[in-house]
Amino acid sequence: MKKELHNINVWNDEKKALFAEIMRLLTDDRGALERFEALLEDPDSYYENHVNGYEEKFFNPNETEDEICWQELAMELYRAGCLQYLDCDPDFEPWEPELRKIPGMEKYLGWLPEKGSGPERMKALNGHLREENLVLAAIDIDSESYPLILITPALLREVNTLAEWAGHRIVPAECLFEGQPSGGSET
């Protein structure tokens, strides 16, 4: 069953509720949840109070409330220590030190192939992780810096469904590296 918003391009209470539910499913960090709730209540004030964080990640202040809130969902999860940003180009930034910062990920780094394209390496890693009932997922913020989080395949399906209803996506990491339009079905 696929839920459709009346207009996914409109920032409204229905979309805010979807964002809030995704956040609650991905963290129980009270501070992150409170900050995110404040963001959903008043994105403009939140932006003004956190403008330095936006400059650090090169967020555009002219983005829509929807875009700001989606990007900030990933940023609040980062601040809470739930995920890590990874540059899509391993030559620009080595992956292993950044992946090591993802909670629970360090013991699985031996499964990351040293050679191969980004999609091949992520697909191989996720192949092994799925044997452990885990998946390295990416929140698609339309950037070349990917917010990655280690979750179960069931949770990935749940949060990606909610994200799709809101006009966004959370997919297995290899899907962003491949530039695939979706990937929730392969969890």
Image: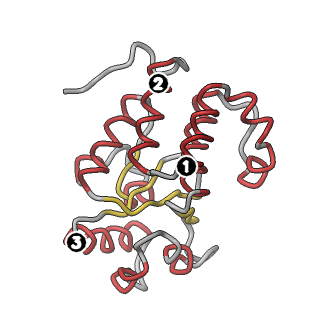
For image coordinates 19% across by 71% down, the residue present is: 131
On the image, the x and y values in percent for residue 5 come to 38, 18
| Mark 1, residue position | 74
CA distance separating discs 2 and 3: 33 Å
| Mark 2, residue position | 15
Image: 173 above or below 61: below
Instruction: Classify mark 1: helix, strand or loop.
Output: helix
For image coordinates 50% across by 26% down, the residue present is: 16
| Location of residue 46 by image quarter | top right
Residue type beneath disc 2: Lys
Q: Which of the image's four quarters has the N terminus?
A: top left
Sequence-wise, which precedes: disc 3 or disc 1? Answer: 1
| Mark 3, residue position | 132
For image coordinates 52% across by 57% down, the residue present is: 147
Instruction: Classify mark 2: helix, strand or loop.
Output: helix
Residue type beneath disc 1: Ala
| Location of residue 62 by image quarter | top right
On the image, the x and y values in percent for residue 73 come to 55, 44
